[in-house]
Amino acid sequence: MYDMHGETVHFDTENNRLCLIDQTKLPNETVILSLHTAEEIYTAIARLQVRGAPAIGVAAAIGLAVLANESAAEASAEFEAEFRKNAAYLISARPTAVNLPWAVGEMQKAFSENRHKSLPEIKAALTRCALGLHAADIDVCRRIGEYGAPLLKNCRAVLTHCNAGRLAAVKYGTALAPVYIAKAQGHAVSVYADETRPLLQGARLTAYELQAAGIEVTAICDNMASYVMQNKLVDAVLVGCDRVARNGDTANKIGTSGVAALAKYYGIPFYVCAPYSTIDFSISSGAEIPIEQRDGAEIGEMWYQIPMLPKGVRTLNPAFDVTDRSLITAFITEKGVLQPSEF
Ligand code: MRU
């Protein structure tokens, strides 16, 4: 098996491939995907073989570099048309996480800054930019962990929703980074993981990666979060995010806003772990965040041996919801623990 160097997303520069752990196969099988066509990369993002806001951004950037290196174009106009077409195609794979257009935008900047150079030089610049975004993600997530760990000093356990851990980024993750760093500093915090219907990122991915890291994890169904808070089993909530508006309204995995409302009711701090690449300074409130609607088959069929919905029943399957900023205690970013007015 290809060595991913402990990473979820990797650039195999020797063979010019985007390498990913196929998250649709976890926790039962560890399958490494090695991708080099636009369709493969688009599909991996759209089908959630790679998922989590930071991970899809880095995957798209590496994907664009791989596609540029594969290009047979000899004229710069032809190369540029191909590059722009691939960039638009990859951005269209998922609408909510702003990291995807952000990372592609960084690649577009690298292209523009080098467009007067030879094609081999442009390709090298795109490769450097993708590697830089990959390295930056590791650094940013580690810093989120370092700022977040002190907030957990008096915590025995935290609740999290979806997967915003190592599998959602290149290495540490965002919401689980404080837990990983606290452990490294000698403070064990146990984690309650919402299973996160309908795609079960909490059960399949968060429980899997925490168990693998030797961190105590307890899986619960989504409708058990109130029980867990009411019985004082958790001292804080940590979640990731896909897009944060200027005012602090935050889109994250469907169900997050309900967890935030519960936390407010029970007086439990609710922290959003947010790399700056997830803050969308172009929008003023959460009302402007596009919410991905996914196939209803994910609700009634996809994970079951037999259908769990009567044939013909309508479904509604929004993949994200927006948590009002008033429910968020603070944002743990790579620049510190902040309120939206300090972004
Ligand atoms: O649909 P997914 O699995 O990509 O949704 C992921 C989430 O909602 C995460 O919480 C978010 O992307 C933050 S990941 C650090």
Image (cartoon, grey):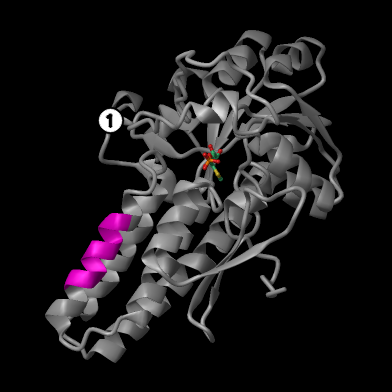
Q: Residue at x 61, y 19 (%)?
A: 259
Secondary structure under tag 1 reads loop
Q: In the image, is residue 78 above or below residue 59?
A: below
Q: Residue at x 81, y 15 (%)?
A: 232
Instruction: Name the residue carrying label 1.
Output: 284
Looking at this view, is 24 or 234 the one in front?
A: 24
Residue 87 is covered by the magenta coloring: yes
Residue at the spot 46% in from the left edge and 52% down from the top edge: 45
Q: Is residue 37 above or below residue 298?
A: below
Q: Main secondary structure of the magenta part?
A: helix
Of all residues, the one furthest to the left in this rendering is 77
10 Å crowding of disc 1: few (<14), some (14-19), many (20+): some
Depth check: give the residue in front, 314 or 2.
314
Q: Position of residue 304 (x, y in %)?
A: 68, 30
Q: Where, quadrant-wise, is the N terminus in this rendering?
A: bottom right
Amino acid type of the residue tagged 1 in the rendering: Ser
Which range is magenta?
81-89
Please say whether residue 155 is visible from this viewpoint: no
